[in-house]
Amino acid sequence: MSDAESPDFDPVAPNTGEDFEPTEVFPESDDFDLRPGADACYKCSICDTNCPVAEVDDDFPGPKFQGPEQWRLKQTDDGYDIDDSVMDCSNCMRCDNACPSGVPLSQMHNTARGEYVSEQMDKFSVEYVRNRILANYRTSAWFASKAPKVANFAMNFGPARWVMEKTMGITSERDFPEFAQQTFREWWADRGGADASRRNARRARERLGDPADAEKKVAYFHGCYSNYNTPEVGKAMVRVYEHFGYEVVAPEQKCSGTPMFANGMLDDARRHAEVNVSSMADLVEEGYDAIASCTSCSMALRQEYPELFDIDGIEEVAANTFEAVEYLRIHEDLRGEVESADVSGDLAREFAYHAPCHARNQGLDRQAVELFRDLEGVGVEDVGESCSGISGTYGWKEEKYEKSMEIGDEMFDHMEDAEGTTGMTECPTCAMQMEHGSGYEIRHPLELLESALVA
Amino acid sequence: MAIESEVLVVGGGLAGLTSALATAREGADVRLLSYKQSTLRQASGLVDLLGYTPDGEGPLTDPYAAMTDLPDSHPYSTVGVETVREAMALFDDVTDYEGGHTDTNALLPTHGGTVKPTARYPRSAAAGLASDDRDALLVGIESMTDFDAPHVASHLEAAGVPFDVRGETIQFPGDLRADAKVTRYAKLLDTDSEVAVRGRKRPAREALAQRVNPLIEDEERVGFPAVLGDDHPAAIRAALSEQMGVDVFEVPMGPPSLPGLRLEDRLFAALDEAGASIETGNPVVSYEGDEHVERVFVEKNGAEIPYAAEQFVLATGGLVGKGIESDREGVSEPIFDCHVPHPADRYDWFDTEVFGDHPFAGFGVETDGRMQPLSADGDVEFENVRAAGSVLGGYDFAAEKSGGGVSIATGYAAGTNAVEELR
């Protein structure tokens, strides 16, 4: 082309005075868009110092690569595929809290992982099938709950576990969590459901001197684990809330989607999210707030749903979702009540507390330690800021087991150094890891609150 | 209801931490709110008081002596030299930093090969002082492009250091990926995990020492980029020193910085010991009240969570930390909308020379002697808000090398003033 010929682009476009937004030069896209935040990353690498996987795994390139760099690479080369290392990200989401520039790293990772699984992963591979089974814990738990004794035996039956490891890559090193004889929902229904809760709440308000028609009502998102495995956490939530005069309802719900995000199963996650959002959105409209006792569940409803899905009512649900203890700290004089209470009996112990990564991201990592500081009869000691290492389904994978234990090593050491030999955490899988690495029994802060305030 | 405390400190950098520490140690019920993780992990870990005068004179030998000549608008002038000393005493009390034994500045080599005047430095950097006349070997790691040891060494020679210095580059034992994270090196050394060297497994510390040993000629000290451990830096240096027969030191690095991380850990632990409450992860976005601030709101995924307090300290950082914002119309402080003095014409905000005297470097809120932000008319804006650190105007920390000291001094002043107000 000689200089006299005109080039085949239209040079006037940016200068014509028509609306031109210099940041919107890429076509709008409805499918996996890794762009949000990529431009804000200035490569300070602080996210990488927070990544528990990068700290122990030579092959993992870290959050900065998984997010902003992958997106940039995709712009330069049409044939660029998502790097398979994205499956090594455990979705702890610590990088989010680290970024001084507000890059939504975990959102980018979830999106990249979703694209990888949907477009690059072999749907007939053992890894895919295994991940899908792990991610859909709720389905397995539902079956198991029908015959918990049989399930408890079968799931920890040595030879069966050997076969699961060899054929599916589910580590045989871990004990499956025990299934409760009665699920939380069964207990809830037997107890009289929402009607019983309303009666209890009204009685409490009378005692507290609150107006009988006070707008104190919450919708409990119990999640799979407190339903099938630790209903005592759900029961504690209900009793503590009723103690403060709150009417509790337990709406229809599916899995929060956390294990699905972590495995790139975004279609599964969306199906569950749609059910959860629709039942919570109606209640939010009626003045309820959504309360979760699992910090990964509250994280999903508050942050991952609105980041990844466009579902009616999702923003309202996100803005009205709270972690169970957090909500009481905001709306009640929780500290005052705890200060004047004491604990005796079963829970009068020293606890070694671990803050789950997903609590950290909601600003709740210090909550339990600070709240129980002045509670007579117990001690709660923080065992440090390291990740527990299990990250939901991550530590259940045969090929990740060793890494998961290496990440958790620091926590195990701190637990050993701590005065107490009972653990405490809000996260069910952190609890599994704590128990697995230390042999300690693990309790939830709500159980301690119940013991202090209600029992 | 709201989440309540007597004093609420907004900001988790050096100023916020010092402020909360000063208040907590006075027995006040204090809560620290930080949007993101502390910016300390982006900092070198060195704490400067005053390296150069605003006119560029220096490096200064005695920073305290030079403070008396600063303009009235400078934060050091606002708090007074005595307060700076008290604040540094608090810092020395809660950290194990070196440099507190003297008023004079220490000269530290940087990872760029310059020599920098600083007031406090971590123990890990102590054997690296540029005023020390022992010869030094700098050891770079092949994949860590931020620290090119031969280049740094020749820069230091050119800067006129009173010793011979050489640089050598090694491959870190264990064959880590080319862009391994600094935390990966630190973790390996912390846990002294085994690494493969020529097919044989060796503990990481020993392997590193063996790799460097043949390179040492007659140097008495060896410097590494700052990757020598996160949890156990002293033990790692001791092990390396023993196996190498020399003093071992670290040269502070840019972000992400392990000395910064260690300082962050230390200060947060001190805050915890003093009984403060700490919360990170969500930004403070607005407030309620008139001349008296009743509460501020933390934004959490669309929910606005109220935090009430009697006294507030604003330590949100400067233009880089987003405690001060600017757009084409003006410069502002986003939470309380405190007045930020600046020229009306945007073209007067900067100098045309890259390294010129840029007015924007000094943008920030102006306070009275009790650290209370002042309006354009010179009136106190809120009766219970104080400001500290780089949200303050009137100084250029980058040119003066005064960032750490101003944060500690003004944080301390704001904190102690807030407590006096409570009692």
Image: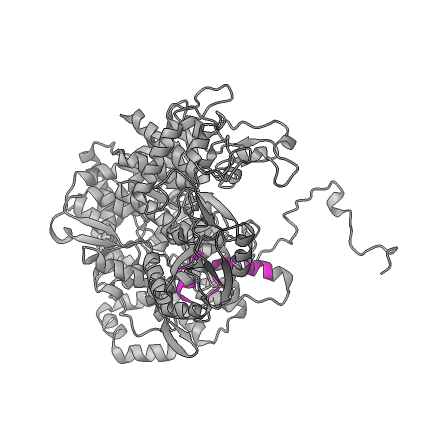
Q: Is residue A24 left or right of residue A223?
A: right
* Residue A62 spot, x, y in % from top left: 47, 61
State the image quarter where residue A68 is shown.
Answer: bottom right
- Picture residue at 48% right of the left edge, 47% below the top: A100
Q: Position of residue A306 (x, y in %)?
A: 47, 50
In this figure, which colouring scheme has been used for the structure? one colour
B306 or A357, which is in the foreground?
A: A357
Instruction: Quadrant for the N terminus of chain B, please.
Output: top left
Tell which residue pokes out farthest to the left in this image. Answer: A345
* Range of residues picked out in magenta: A49-73
For the question of whether residue B252 can be seen, the reply is: yes
Q: Residue B100: x percent and y percent?
A: 35, 41
In-front residue for pair B292/B20: B20
Residue in the foreground of this view, choosing between A381 and A311 = A381
Q: Answer left or right for B67 relative to A195.
A: right
Helix, strand or loop: magenta stretch: helix
Give coordinates of residue B353: x percent, y percent.
65, 39
In this view, A83 is above or below B260: below
